[in-house]
Image (tube, rainbow, N blue to C red):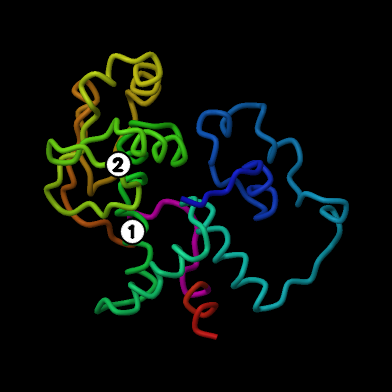
Amino acid sequence: MARYTGSVCKLCRREGEKLYLKGSRCYSEKCSFDRRPYAPGEHGQGRHKVSEYGLQLREKQKVRRIYGLMEKQYRNYFEEAENIPGVTGENFLQLLERRLDNVVYRLGYATSRSEARQFVLHGHIYVNGRRVNIASYQVDVDDVISVKEASKKSKRFKEVLEYNADLAPKEWLSVDMEKAEGKVLALPTREDIDYPVEEHLIVEYYSR
């Protein structure tokens, strides 16, 4: 599976805002974006006039990087969203939110989506009592997402669950942190997307 292996802090700086890709580090004084809030490279601090295409590209790249996807997979989601009745942009975001790695992150079983993806790939996550190691797995209403019983005893999971003990899940999810067991109450809506995104720019980018 192809994945980005470079510095994720550079991605935040390139997009000009925090994407919260490194979990707790993003909230600390070690955050690279707080220390250097400009694009990487020797021309990063220069003034740049952004075209309409540039705005569309940056919005597309921002959301792609938030969810940690490569371009081909990201575009496949968009093409799937186009074939679903309703608003394409909202359908697109819903498909991204329903990814298993994103849901694991939303439930508080991980401090970042990349960590959540790693937990899924390593077989620590169960859906409806069955192990699922596919990060792109699409959850559905009434699915129960839990942490493998043996994994709950690991040092890392104990740290994460304690760190996120007071985390309030999205309205479309419920979670029992003591049992490390969550449930999908409904499909996510546009209002459940808690970061600033202008999905119409992404639609315009792919509609060129």
Q: Dividing the image into 4 quarters, which one contains the C terminus?
A: bottom right
Camera-near label (1 vs 2) is 2
Q: State the residue position of label 1.
A: 191
What's under tag 1, amino acid-wise?
Glu
Image point (29%, 79%), residue name: 83
Image point (58%, 29%), residue name: 25
Q: State the residue position of label 2.
A: 133
Q: Quadrant of residue 34?
A: top right
User: Magenta part of the protein: which range?
Assistant: 192-201
Image point (34%, 16%), residue name: 158
- Tell me if 129 is positioned left or right of 170 in this view: left
What's under tag 2, amino acid-wise?
Asn
Looking at the image, residue 162 lies above or below residue 31:
above
Looking at the image, residue 146 lies above or below residue 78:
above
Mark 1 or 2, nearer chain start:
2
Q: Position of residue 191 (x, y in %)?
A: 33, 58
User: Residue 86's mark?
Assistant: none
- Tell me if 197 is positioned left or right of 176 in this view: right
Q: Residues within 10 Å of mark 2 (few under 14, many from 20)?
A: many
